[in-house]
Structures are given as structure tokens and as C-alpha cells.
Amino acid sequence: MKDKLEQILKEFRSGLETLSQQPQILKYKSDALGKNGQLSQILKSLKDLSNEERKVVGPLANKIKEEMNQLVASKLKEIEVQEINQKLEQNKIDITDRMVNRSNSLCHGGLHPTSLIQREIEDIFISMGFEVLDGPHIEDDYHNFEALNIPSDHPARDMQDTFWFQTEDGVRKFLLRTHTSTIQVRGMKDRKPPFRFIAPGKVFRCERTDASHEMVFHQLEGMMVGEDISIGHLIYFMKTVLKEIFKKEVEVRLRPGFFPFVEPGFELDIRCLICGGKGCSVCKQTGWVELLPCGMVHPRVLEAGGIDPQKYNGYAFGLGLDRLVMMRYGIDDIRHLHSADLRFISQFKDF
Ligand code: FA5
């Protein structure tokens, strides 16, 4: 019986070696190990053996069954690896290869205009002593609203239509951040005044799109906290940045604006550079583009960031990055920026 078991294993192994397709192997296995297979027959006949024989044959039959299973598993693994290697070989991509255009000259990629402007602005702020921070796109209610002095029953929540994640119990706790102001409290918590930082990034709103509105767009948050910070500091930094970006003085106007996280709050608009102030679809025929809401940080927001509002104060702003890109390059519709149209994108190659 012992010899017979070893013979079964030997034959199974050599039969398996001749197979190379997964379905064939699975069938081979079920034939050999199924209830009509030789091994099952031996296991069934154990009851007819003497006690002594059963003690030897039983464990040996189980060991051989285990070994046959292992042979099949490693054969299947081997085939899987072969298939993956074959696919990799067929779909080989040479990342050093260059694309050639219709006129047979080499072409290469470049940065998106939003990235170009973002990098330029980061450099300007870094040169003025600002840090550059990052934050999560999926935010919690606390950092997007509560900590910014916008409690759940506050009407200001309606100013930004929000994409919420619904939890299983129906509670709205997480959302796609509606503004980069979420970084204010995160940034303050990790720092001691005086400090200044910016935080560029994507934001998301459930909005109807038009020439100046997108559902996914970019903002660049900025914050400066210390002793005796004034609106004068705010205006100075904003004007310096705009002058650097546009390489000339641009006409700006400051008007009162309401944001629960600043007091007082302002809207800084720039004279529309698409129409020169005459009126167009980008400036909604007003001649001015809303670009840079800002204000002095509300004491409650400083407190949420662990900063004593009796001792320190600061300013914050939230630059609309896409609109700045539009003004800088004379783009008359924000939707071009996400169009992925190579004819549009390739105009901005920086090298
Ligand atoms: C805010 O998001 C505030 N968090 C900004 C802020 C920060 C105020 C710090 C005070 C202090 P607002 O919703 O206005 O504000 O958006 C800021 C800028 O983002 C706007 O001025 C505009 O330039 C840009 N923006 C707003 N909505 C859109 C949109 N749908 N598409 C493209 N740009 C937009």
C-alpha cells in the first residue's frame, strides 16, 4: 500500500509537468483528488486494514494529498508569473522614448499654466519669509467650518456648496474641502507666533460652471500672525505679490467683504485684464474680477489655533489661483484650464 501511494504521487507529478494551462491543471487536480481518484479510494479502504497498517497508511495518504495540493499551487503560481512576464514583455514602454510630431521634430511635455503660476507665487512668498504648507483634500467639518467660526447652523455655510461624504449612520462628517482656509487652524496649531505661511491647493464646490467658475479649482491661502499686524501689512504684501506676478502695477480696489473667520473682511478685486475694464463674460460686465478675499483673523479662529488673541493678531487671505492664471495669460474661460486640450496646454511650455 505504501509503495502504491508513492507511485500515485510520482505519476501525479510527472503528469502535472506536461500541463501548462490553468483550466487543464484544475481539472487534473479534481480528477486526481476527487472522490473517484485513486487516493480517495485508498482513504476509503482504510477501514478494511488492520490497526497497525492503518496507523502507517492513513498519515502517509494525507501527507501525499497535501503534497499534491502544494504541487498544484506552485504550478499555478508559476503560470501566473509567466503570464505577467509575457504581458510586461508585450506592453513594454520605453520611458526614455521621445514623441515625434507631424513635422517629425521631437516634442516634450511641460508644466500646466496653473502649476507655473503656483510655483512663481511660491517663490515670491518664500523670498518674503513665508513657509509653504500642504493639507488634505478630504477634510472634516471641524477644519473646514467649525474652527473657522462657522458653526453648523450658521447661514455662511450656504456660501459654499459642499460635496459631503455620507457615513453609514447618515452623519455628515467628512467633505471635499471647499477652501484652503482649512490650513489656517492646522498651520497655527503647529507653530508659535510670529509666523507666516501660504498653502496652495485644489478645492471643490458643487457649483454651476461658467467662464469664471469651476467645480474643482485652486486657491492659495496665506496667513501671517504676530504682534501688531495691521491691514497695512496685508495691503503691502498683496500689492507686492500682484506687482511681481504681472510685472507691472495693476489696478486694485478693496471693498468690504464678509467671511466669518476674519474681522474686518475685504474683497480685493483687480481691474479685468481680459477686457481692460470694459466688461466681458469673465468679469460679468463689471470691469473688475474678484480675486483675493482677505481680512484680519477673527479672535475665535486664533483661539481654535491655540493662539492668545489678547497678545497676537494676524491677517489671512484666499487667492483664487485659476482666476489669477486667467488674468496673467489672458485666458477668457476658466474651463480651458481643465480641458486637457493639448492645443491649449502646449502654449505654456516653459522650456
Ligand atoms: C473663500 O474661499 C475664503 N476662504 C477666502 C478667504 C481666506 C477669505 C482668508 C478671508 C480670509 P471665496 O469663496 O470668495 O472665499 O473664494 C476665494 C476666491 O476663490 C475667489 O475670490 C475667487 O477668485 C476664487 N473662486 C471662488 N469660487 C470659484 C469657482 N467656482 N471657480 C473658480 N474660482 C473660484
Image (tube, rainbow, N blue to C red):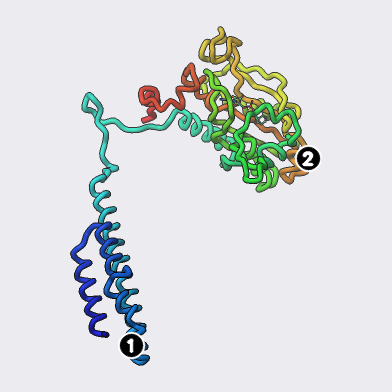
Q: CA distance from mark 1 to mark 2?
A: 90 Å
Task: Answer yes or no: is residue 299 visible.
Answer: yes
One can see residue 132 in this view: no
Amino acid type, residue under disc 2 in the picture? Pro
Q: Residue at x 81, y 40 (%)?
A: 310
Question: Measured from the top left, where is residue 90 in percent x and y?
Answer: 23, 46
Residue 219 image offset from top left, x and y in percent: 57, 31
**Front-lying residue, 98 or 120:** 98
Of all residues, the one furthest to the top in this rendering is: 278
Q: Which of the pair 350/207 is nearer the observer?
A: 207
Up-down relation of residue 33 to residue 253 (above or below): below
Decide: few, some or many residues near mark 1? Use Cα within 10 Å; few <14, some 14-19, many ≥20: few
Residue at x 30% of width, y 76% of height: 41
Q: Which residue is mark 2?
A: 309
In the rendered image, which quarter contains the N terminus?
bottom left
**Quarter holding the C terminus?**
top left
Q: Dot 1 corresponds to which residue?
A: 49
Going from N to C along the chain, the mark reached first, 1 or 2, is 1
Kindly give the residue lying farthest to the front in the view shown.
48
Q: Secondary structure at mark 1?
A: loop
The residue nearer to you, when weighing 29 against 71, is 29
